[in-house]
Image (spheres, grey):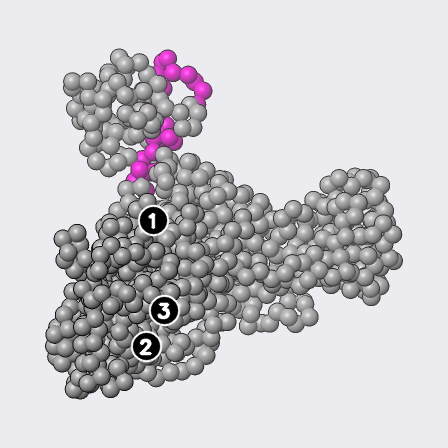
């Protein structure tokens, strides 16, 4: 095997990769593809930008990140053995690091390093590993941004501005030979701190209180505040360079000394393997499926009730968007659930495309036309529609009631509830559920630890001890533990999955597992047998109630919801018939005979006599009074009834006056007058200008057709294989154009062309060169400016030149293309390879 020159730059390392490896990089970091880089050099430059590196670091698991952090504090470049030592330690500590942990790190390190290499965060051979500069700057320690490892700067970095005299004092205090060369002094002090024997002897002579100060700083933060007159232990450490000044009041523990105290480890607790999920309970899988199906049925009933509640036009929309606190509370009361749960159902229906704004001047929420189609679906299909919408939604109802960054309250259906990480967290949580045996309910705490290990930089601040004063006048920094969004999303996922019937009794149901692995149809097939069949009957009782022992068929449920009021819900729904509910059915155009026939047809018990009397009594009085628009009038053939209304003190506010023996006029509008008389115990009916009774059916307000909100993806989408292949070919071709040796013309400059610069030739030279290439089958390099003014470099093999156009095989695009000659900035022949 021949020798190869080690890559000197990231671009050279990428250039040496195969096509599959480049495709893997673009797949892992899709932000590098927008737009497709012109060549390898541009790809390497883009891969080293701060935004791209931050995004790549955020997608590393904890051990890969710990590996990168270790490289950030290692010499640059660092051999593999040095990196391994920083993770496992030198074995001379007090026993915190065990042999099995060291073996696990040794086994996991090649995989972590391969991940970093694939994502172009690390490059170089094992004897010269390099972390990309931007990642080193992000992860390396500094006073403004302490290292995640808790290590401080090196001795050389910490003493950069120190006077030679102060260096001599430190050397003298530590027993080192004096030298007037600052570089030699720093090297001698660094050598002392990295020599285990001499360092141990130095620490053995330290006061006990001084060792206590070091114990507070060794695992970070390494910075502490020092008083103007430090106590003897702190002065002892400062005199010997174990605490070096950063400012007049701040000192730092140098990295070499900290590594000695840590037994060579960069991290206190390396985590080479992901935390295992612990089982909180083992359930019977069939019981889990039944419990989840029962909750799925409840979810469908709740969403249907919400649609019915807002059927005639829901609450108005706040000026800033969303529901007011009062409207959410009303909705929660109507659904008989707490407000946070009501917010979840409202957001779910909105995300599923069942609710939307009607777009009117007095803007309100209302069901969409798609809600009617959804209601007509079988129950299992309705559930899969909701579950799929929930999985993909970026809306996070758990935020409702909180505040945004500006201190403004977050409202349900408001514009500030989208979180791009929500779909990824939901799917990852359910994937962890799916990895457990059926019927296993995972422990939530171990689930959160696993998620934090997989995305530690998305996991928010790690727990840290509160700041405490050190002996002798120093204090070590610290911070309170923060609750991160990703963990809260995971906890909300657990609660919402249970509400929706994804899980049952804390374990993943088989229908949800089918939804994740096989799709909606398979999930519907699994769920359908577990849902109760809709019934076509009720049980009428003598106390003016009807009991529905299960879900009702939709026509029966719709009619019953008009004729009666829901009194209680549960396994069986209880409806109560009242004069107001019967009048509501009569207002909707039903006659008394229709109601009797309906009840007789759908009751498994005889229609009770009190219910028949109630219907007949309300029907007899219904429409006896007629109300129309004058502003408004009341008409009745029975003068005694009108006399009774005029004598009633409750009618004073209606400002009624008699126009004729059978007609009263009012200055109120017909609607308020109608409601007022109903509140007084009458059963008036509205009539048209022609004297006909107006039928008021149950309201059905619908929004214009609307597409459900498209979830905002977290970062750029992962490219497919076709796009990756085309991108790799384009980058390779562009790189060939940028790096291949080109034949120099007599008029061309002898100096090399700047990287990325387009070739420049006259139109006559361009035409002559491409014509010659077409005749000889040669490949040439051109600069091209498209119609949008975007310039690019291309490698083409001309086939035909005519009519001001050149037809050629474009190696960059891997296809035949035609280029106008006037858009070609210049052309250069490619030199033959030696």
Q: Quadrant of residue 513?
A: bottom left
Most extreme residue toward the front is: 661
Classify 742 as above or below 399. Answer: above
Q: In this orientation, which residue lies closer to the viewer: 596 or 205?
A: 596
> How many marks do you count on the picture?
3
Q: Tell which tag, 2 or 3, sits nearer the viewer.
A: 2
Q: Which mark is residue 567?
A: 2
Residue 720 in the image, given as x and y percentages of width and height: 29, 49
- Would residue 742 be counted in the magenta stretch? yes
Q: Residues under labels 3 and 1: Cα distance?
A: 23 Å
Residue 741 in the image, given as x and y percentages of width and height: 37, 28
Start-end of magenta stretch: 728-752
Q: Residues under labels 2 and 1: Cα distance?
A: 31 Å
Classify 383 as above or below 474. Answer: below
Q: Residue at x 45, y 58 (%)?
A: 325
Residue that numbered label 1 is attached to: 363
Q: Residues within 10 Å of mark 1 (few under 14, many from 20)?
A: some
Which comes sooner in the sequence, label 3 or label 1?
3
Q: Quadrant of residue 259?
A: bottom right
Which comes sooner in the sequence, label 2 or label 1?
1
Classify 95 as above or below 452. Answer: below
Q: In this orientation, which residue lies closer to the viewer: 678 or 348?
A: 678
709 sits to left or right of 809 = right
Q: Tell which tag, 2 or 1, sits nearer the viewer.
A: 2
Q: In this orientation, which residue lies closer to the viewer: 647 or 406?
A: 647
Look at the numbered disc 3 and give the secondary structure of its residue: helix
**Do the CB atoms of the residues marked 2 and 1 lie less than 8 Å apart?**
no
268 sits to left or right of 720 = right
Which comes sooner in the sequence, label 2 or label 3?
3
Q: Which mark is residue 335?
A: 3
Q: Quadrant of residue 99?
A: bottom right
């Amino acid at each position: 095997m021949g020798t190869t020159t080690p890559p000197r730059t990231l671009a050279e390392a990428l250039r040496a990769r195969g096509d599959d490896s480049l495709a893997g990089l673009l797949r892992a970091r899709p932000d590098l593809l927008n737009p497709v880089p012109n060549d390898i050099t541009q790809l390497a430059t883009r891969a080293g930008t701060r935004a791209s590196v931050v995004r790549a670091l955020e997608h590393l698991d904890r051990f890969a990140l710990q590996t990168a952090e270790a490289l950030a504090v290692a010499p640059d470049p660092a051999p593999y053995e040095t990196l391994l030592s920083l993770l496992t330690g030198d074995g001379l500590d007090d026993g915190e690091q065990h042999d099995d942990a060291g073996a696990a790190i040794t086994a996991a390190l090649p995989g972590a390093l391969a991940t970093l290499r694939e994502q172009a965060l690390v490059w170089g051979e094992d004897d010269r590993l390099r972390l990309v500069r931007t990642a080193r700057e992000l992860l390396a320690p500094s006073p403004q941004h302490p290292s995640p490892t808790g290590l401080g700067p090196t001795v050389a970095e910490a003493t950069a501005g120190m006077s030679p005299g102060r260096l001599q004092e430190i050397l003298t205090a530590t027993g080192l030979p004096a030298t007037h060369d600052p570089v030699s002094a720093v090297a001698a002090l660094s050598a002392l701190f990295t020599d285990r024997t001499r360092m141990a002897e130095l620490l053995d002579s330290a006061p006990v209180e001084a060792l206590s100060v070091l114990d507070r700083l060794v695992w970070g933060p390494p910075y502490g505040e020092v008083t103007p007159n430090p106590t003897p232990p702190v002065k002892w450490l400062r005199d010997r360079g174990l605490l070096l000044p950063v400012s007049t009041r701040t000192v730092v523990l140098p990295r070499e000394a900290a590594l000695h105290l840590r037994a060579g480890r960069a991290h206190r607790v390396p985590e080479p393997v992901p935390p295992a999920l612990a089982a909180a309970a083992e359930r019977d899988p069939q019981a889990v499926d039944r419990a989840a199906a029962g909750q799925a049925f409840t979810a469908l009933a709740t969403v249907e009730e919400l649609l019915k509640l807002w059927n005639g036009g829901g609450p108005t929309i706040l000026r800033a968007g969303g529901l007011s606190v009062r409207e959410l509370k009303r909705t929660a009361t109507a659904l008989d659930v707490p407000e946070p749960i009501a917010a979840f159902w409202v957001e779910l229906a909105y995300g599923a495309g069942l609710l939307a704004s009607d777009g009117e001047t007095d803007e309100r929420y209302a069901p969409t036309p798609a809600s009617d189609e959804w209601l007509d679906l079988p129950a299992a299909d309705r559930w899969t529609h909701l579950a799929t919408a929930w999985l993909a939604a970026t809306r996070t109802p758990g935020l409702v009631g909180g505040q945004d960054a500006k201190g403004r309250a977050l409202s349900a259906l408001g514009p500030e509830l989208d979180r791009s990480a929500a779909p990824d967290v939901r799917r990852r949580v359910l994937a962890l559920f799916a990895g457990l045996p059926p019927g296993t309910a995972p422990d939530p705490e171990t689930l959160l630890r696993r998620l934090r290990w997989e995305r530690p930089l998305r996991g928010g601040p790690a727990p840290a001890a509160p700041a405490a004063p050190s002996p002798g006048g120093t204090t070590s920094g610290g911070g309170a533990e923060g609750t991160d969004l990703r963990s809260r999303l995971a906890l909300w996922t657990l609660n919402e999955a249970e509400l929706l019937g994804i899980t049952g009794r804390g374990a993943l149901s088989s229908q949800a597992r089918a939804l994740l692995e096989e799709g909606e149809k398979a999930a519907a097939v699994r769920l359908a047998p577990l849902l109760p069949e809709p019934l076509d009957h009720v049980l009428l009782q003598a106390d003016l109630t009807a009991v529905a022992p299960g879900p009702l068929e939709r026509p029966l449920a719709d009619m019953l919801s008009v004729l009666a009021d829901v009194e209680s819900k549960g396994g069986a729904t209880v409806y109560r018939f009242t004069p107001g509910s019967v009048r509501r059915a009569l207002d909707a155009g039903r006659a008394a005979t229709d109601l009797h026939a309906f009840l007789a047809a759908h009751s498994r018990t005889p229609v009770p006599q009190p219910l028949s009397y109630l219907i007949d009594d309300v029907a007899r009085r219904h429409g006896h009074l007629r109300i129309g628009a004058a502003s408004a009038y009341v008409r009745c053939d029975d003068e005694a009834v009108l006399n009774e209304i005029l004598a009633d003190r409750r009618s004073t506010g209606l400002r009624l006056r008699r126009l004729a023996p059978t007609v009263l006029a009012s200055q109120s509008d017909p609607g308020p007058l109608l409601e007022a008389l109903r509140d007084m115990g009458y059963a008036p009916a509205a009539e048209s200008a022609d004297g006909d009774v107006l039928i008021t059916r149950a309201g059905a307000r619908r929004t214009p057709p609307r597409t459900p909100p498209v979830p905002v993806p977290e970062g750029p989408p992962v490219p497919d294989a076709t796009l990756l292949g085309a991108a790799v070919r384009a980058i390779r071709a562009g790189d060939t154009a940028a790096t291949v040796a080109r034949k120099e013309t007599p008029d061309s400059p002898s100096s090399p062309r700047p990287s990325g610069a387009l070739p420049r030739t006259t139109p006559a030279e361009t035409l002559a060169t491409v014509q010659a290439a077409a005749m000889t089958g040669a490949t040439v390099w051109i600069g091209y400016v498209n119609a949008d003014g975007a310039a690019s470099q291309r490698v083409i093999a001309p086939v035909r030149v005519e009519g001001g156009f050149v037809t050629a095989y474009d190696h960059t695009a891997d296809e035949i293309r035609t280029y106008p000659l006037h858009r070609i900035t210049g052309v250069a022949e490619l030199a033959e390879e030696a």
